[in-house]
Image (spheres, helix red, strand yellow):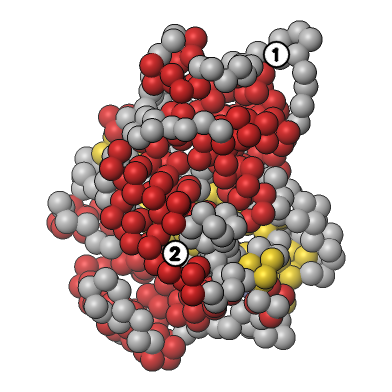
Amino acid sequence: MASTPSSHIEARQTAYAGNGLFARTAVPAGEEILRVGRPLVAALDSAQLRTTCANCFVSAYNNSQSQDEGAVGGEGTLKACLGCQVVRYCSKDCQSVAWKHSHRFECKIFKALHPNVLPNTVRLVMQLLLRRHNGALSDSAWKSFLDLESHMADFKKSKVQNEDNLTTWQTIELMSHAVVKYSGTKETVDNVQAMLARAMINTHTLTTPTLDPIGLCLDPRTALVNHSCTPNAHVVIDRGCLALRSLRSIPLDAEITLSYIDATTPTAKRSSELQSRYFFTCKCSSCSHLLTCGKPDPPQDPSFERATAAAFGLQSEAVSLQTLEAARKLEAALTALQAFPPYWQPYASIQHQAFLNALSCQIWPLALKYGVASAVHIEPLQYPLPWHPIRVVRIWILLRLMVQILGLLQEKDDAVQALKHLNLDWRNLSITLYRQLRDDVAKSHGTDSSLAAEVKAFGDGLGDPSPGSEQMTAEVALRFLAQQLDRMVIKV
Ligand SMILES: [Zn+2]
Ligand SMILES: [Zn+2]
Ligand SMILES: [Zn+2]
């Protein structure tokens, strides 16, 4: 996918936050606003280096897009760079593109440090410096990076500490020594520190198309997009290409906005996160009116605070165990909060964690119960647009779970015993969900995205609805399923 700078947008000065990106034409909902192509720079998290192609970011566990024949998934489908053994690729093409682009400058450095690996922010800044010093980064690209805000003074003042009790500035100082030492740059330490600060404040999380975080990426064009807690756009990263897409319709001359944080948390929490990580006070309409997802913030009520503390305690005990024990703790955490609306955090995120935990423990009926409850009672309130990427990805997981359950029911497998007495047409339900998903993924990710292709291939395998079967919308089908599951007691 080539870079196609769009005529939809232009950078303009905002009244409150330096530059921003504005719509030069009206943009309908669910459209591509700007396709950046390959971002200026990206770096995988250290933990992802073994399992993710360092060029196109396809995961070894979802490698249907690989150009190498016979790829069936798993780490073995990625080939390690013979020089450093640190980065891996899904194909010879990816390896050769990455080598020409930047890896030829960093391979020896990675090799000398192997099996140790530098942190992703260090690798990201080092790559920019190495490309610049080797004539592989244009003047305009270099300038557009240096023009980004560094917030150096704010970083120096910040008292926020990481898990090693280092302030953000101390972390920047440590990282700058590593960048200078390993890149051999002639830049001053001050300059390197400013680059690290720029990287920390202007990166997006690098994600898979299903929104799993896998690293960091930075592009000066999308770095100009300012924050709103009710954003009108979102970022999709697919096969190494970054695109900005509209969530809602964006009128001519309106500012394009992204959410830098989890906007489902209450105003006070959003404010403190935006202040400590990005050094600004959000003045969006949600923050001005103390709203969370369009509704008043949860009240400061002692009983809610007690329940929240109890739930967090149980959640922290569950965090490291992908087990039945964790399933019990998470269920207890949800029970502690059951007197309050389910879309108030932390109920919503704990229920999602319980869903993922039940999936990994293969307790299929329980996973279905949590997943359907979130899709019916929580996600439409948190993200009112059905094509919001988070809703699309969660429906995609739910659809695959339903088809898995359909297969196990046909095999009379004991793992789905609890669902047997529900007299449901699982295949028709799955087809209904698929048809909605097919339309929504075209808006969230684009019709030519790898996720749209994967969804379509999966849906084609389901066939057509049975003749004479009742056709309902996905919303009605999920509500019906939620009612059935609510009455069911699932022991763990
Ligand atoms: Zn690749
Ligand atoms: Zn290498
Ligand atoms: Zn806000």
Q: How many marks?
A: 2
CB at disc 1 and ligand 1 closer than 8 Å: no
Q: Amino acid at mark 2?
A: Ala
Front residue of this view, candidates 84 and 440: 440
Residue drawn at x 21%, y 44% as measured from the top left:
85
Q: Horizontal and vertical percent for residue 248?
A: 75, 56
Mark 1 = which residue? 464
Q: Is 453 or 111 nearer to us in this picture?
A: 453
Tell me if 121 is positioned left or right of 481 in this view.
left
Where does label 2 land, which residue?
307
**Where residue 250 sits in the image (x, y, percent)?**
79, 61
Q: Name the residue type under label 1.
A: Asp
Which residue is at 22% across, 40% downward?
82
Say left or right for 331 vs 482: left
Observer able to see residue 217: no
In front: mark 1 or mark 2?
2
Is 157 situated above or below 65? below
Q: Which label belongs to residue 415?
A: none
Q: What residue do we see at 22% from left, 57% from top?
A: 117
- Between residues 179 and 288, which one lies in front from this camera angle? 288
Q: Is residue 90 left or right of residue 405?
A: left
* Crowd around label 1: few <14 · some 14–19 · many ≥20 (10 Å): few
Task: Report helix, strand or loop for mark 1.
Answer: loop
